[in-house]
């Protein structure tokens, strides 16, 4: 389904081959032309009438994504059908209607609220006579604009290349040559094969670079673990206020912006809880409905910190019109990365904007706190709840360690918090707060009460 019709637009893969980590050319010359505000029509399929509000929330968000990408949403078309059409996603008639709407609104592009198959995209572009983008490409485009660290850039580029690989086409077609056919075909199979091989080479290069980075990170987090401190990851929907919360709690100075996906890199800061425990708090990339799987795959090294956390602080914007939908979107990403069994504390943020909504949401969840990361309201409560949860993950035990086992004493210090250490005739009597797993490892030295 890749080559063939010759009518699809060609992605210029050359632009993704620059630099050590390869600056993704998409930032300057991406899917959306940012030299002017492109006019965009949004299109979605709802599968049953009941899902209408859900589809609308999703489309609302798509409009926000389009705006974040630097273009103007100028129209919306929703189609209700049993299943997306295999060849054109919306029905063929609807596609024709989309063209008319786009013509009348003078729109440059139609963005579909789902991932299109390469074939659907090609077919749609033929009918629409303009480009057809999908949600995935749009989100990838925004990530590309926001990536700043070498790792972030590499992860985004990897996701983009994986998205493009099945979409590579023969070159030669541009929209100004509409109606072509003969004469609009590209150089053919050979060039296509060359392009594809190059792309695959670049993909494996990025994968190995990222693997190395991941290894380095694992070493770092191991040394952090050795000092027995807990890792807490701040997760949540994009723009919920995760970075603001990290800043409020630790003065981290992370960039805060009223835009989607302002944060792509993980930032970790130490935080001392009122109970005395030191924890490591990490702010990371935000999630969104239908987060492209290519991105989730590519961001494994960033998301490791979530998977390895002892506790998740799930930040929700309580002034969000559909907070439950956002919470569900976050859960679905957590499931995808295998972090859904980690204990979560819900933080209903922006309580200053909508106190009633925040209160309502707090009542719905078991472990929940209403806060405002901006005014500081509720933050003390949050720290107290975090402390309580961590204490549940550990227990206070009594140990007896003979003097010739200095190694065990050192290990106890490394893995836990030593509360008391009394030298006696034959060894140390130690009282320590330890993780359940450490307790297992030190079993031989436990003094049963
Ligand atoms: N009124 C109010 N605004 C808030 C609060 N917390 C965050 N904001 C605003 O919400 C916007 C997003 O905040 P960020 O901290 O960047 O959100 P984020 O979750 O890190 O977002 P991404 O990194 O883009 O996923 C900013 O404009 C913040 O000033 C709050 O408690 N009250
Ligand atoms: Mg952020």
Image (cartoon, helix red, strand yellow):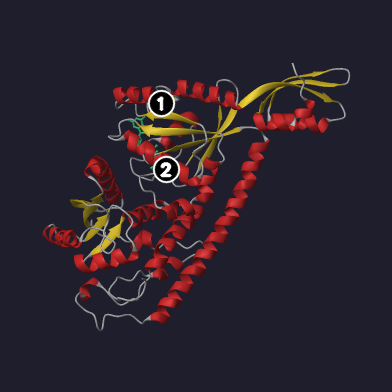
Residue farthest to the front?
82
Badge count: 2
Q: Residue under circle 1?
A: 365
The residue closer to the viewer here, 249 or 76, is 76
Q: Is mark 1 within 8 Å of ligand 1?
A: no
Q: For mark 1, does the 10 Å Cα neighbourhood hold few (<14), some (14 to 19), or many (20 or more) residues?
A: few
The residue closer to the viewer here, 227 or 441, is 441
Q: Indicate which disc, 2 or 1, sits on the residue closer to the N terminus.
A: 2
Instruction: Tell me if residue 34 comes above or below residue 174 in the rendering.
Output: above
The residue closer to the viewer here, 104 or 339, is 339
Pick the quarter of the image with the N terminus.
bottom left
- Tell me the residue at 43%/63% (across/down): 161
Q: Residue under circle 2?
A: 332
- Tell me the residue at 77%/20% (across/down): 447
Question: Can you tell which quarter of the image residue 358 is in?
Answer: top left
Please state the horizontal and vertical placement of residue 259, each as a whole percent of the image.
33, 43
Q: For mark 2, does the 10 Å Cα neighbourhood hold few (<14), some (14 to 19), or many (20 or more) residues?
A: some
Q: Describe the element under mark 1 as helix, strand or loop.
A: loop
């Amino acid at each position: 389904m890749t080559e063939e019709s010759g009518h699809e637009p060609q992605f210029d893969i050359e632009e993704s081959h620059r630099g050590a980590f390869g600056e993704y050319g998409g930032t300057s010359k991406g899917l959306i032309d940012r030299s002017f505000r492109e006019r965009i029509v949004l299109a979605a399929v709802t599968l049953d009438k009941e899902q209408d509000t859900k589809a609308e929330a999703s489309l609302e968000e798509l409009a926000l994504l389009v705006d974040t990408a630097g273009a103007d949403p100028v129209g919306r078309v929703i189609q209700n059908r049993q299943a997306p059409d295999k060849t054109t996603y919306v029905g063929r008639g609807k596609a024709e209607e989309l063209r008319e709407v786009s013509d009348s609104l003078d729109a440059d592009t139609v963005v579909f609220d789902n991932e299109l198959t390469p074939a659907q995209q090609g077919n749609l572009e033929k009918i629409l006579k303009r480009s057809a983008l999908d949600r995935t490409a749009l989100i990838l485009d925004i990530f590309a604009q926001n990536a700043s660290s070498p790792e972030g850039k590499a992860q985004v580029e990897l996701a983009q290349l994986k998205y493009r690989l099945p979409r590579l086409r023969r070159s030669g077609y541009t929209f100004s040559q509409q109606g072509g056919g003969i004469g609009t075909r590209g150089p053919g199979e050979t060039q296509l094969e060359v392009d594809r091989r190059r792309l695959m080479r670049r993909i494996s290069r990025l994968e190995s670079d990222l693997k190395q980075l991941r290894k380095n990170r694992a070493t770092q987090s191991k040394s952090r673990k050795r000092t027995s401190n807990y890792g807490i990851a701040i997760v949540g929907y994009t723009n919920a206020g995760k970075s603001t919360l990290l800043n409020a709690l630790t003065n981290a100075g992370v960039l805060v912006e009223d835009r989607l996906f302002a944060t792509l890199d993980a930032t970790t800061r130490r935080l001392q809880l009122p109970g005395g425990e030191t924890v490591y708090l990490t702010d990371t990339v935000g999630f969104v409905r239908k987060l492209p799987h290519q991105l989730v795959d590519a961001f494994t090294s960033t998301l490791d910190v979530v998977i390895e956390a002892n506790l998740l602080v799930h930040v929700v914007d309580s002034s969000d019109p559909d907070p439950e939908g956002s919470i569900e979107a976050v859960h679905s990403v957590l499931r995808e990365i295998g972090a859904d069994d980690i204990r979560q504390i819900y933080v209903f943020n922006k309580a200053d904007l909508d106190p009633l909504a925040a209160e309502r949401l707090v009542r719905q969840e078991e472990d929940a706190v209403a806060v405002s990361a901006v005014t500081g309201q509720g933050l003390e409560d949050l720290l107290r709840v975090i402390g309580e949860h961590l204490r549940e993950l550990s227990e206070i035990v009594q140990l007896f360690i003979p003097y010739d086992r200095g190694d065990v004493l050192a290990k106890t210090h490394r893995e836990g918090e030593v509360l008391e250490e009394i030298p006696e005739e034959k060894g140390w009597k130690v009282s320590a707060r330890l993780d359940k797993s450490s307790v297992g490892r030190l079993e031989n030295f436990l003094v049963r009460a």
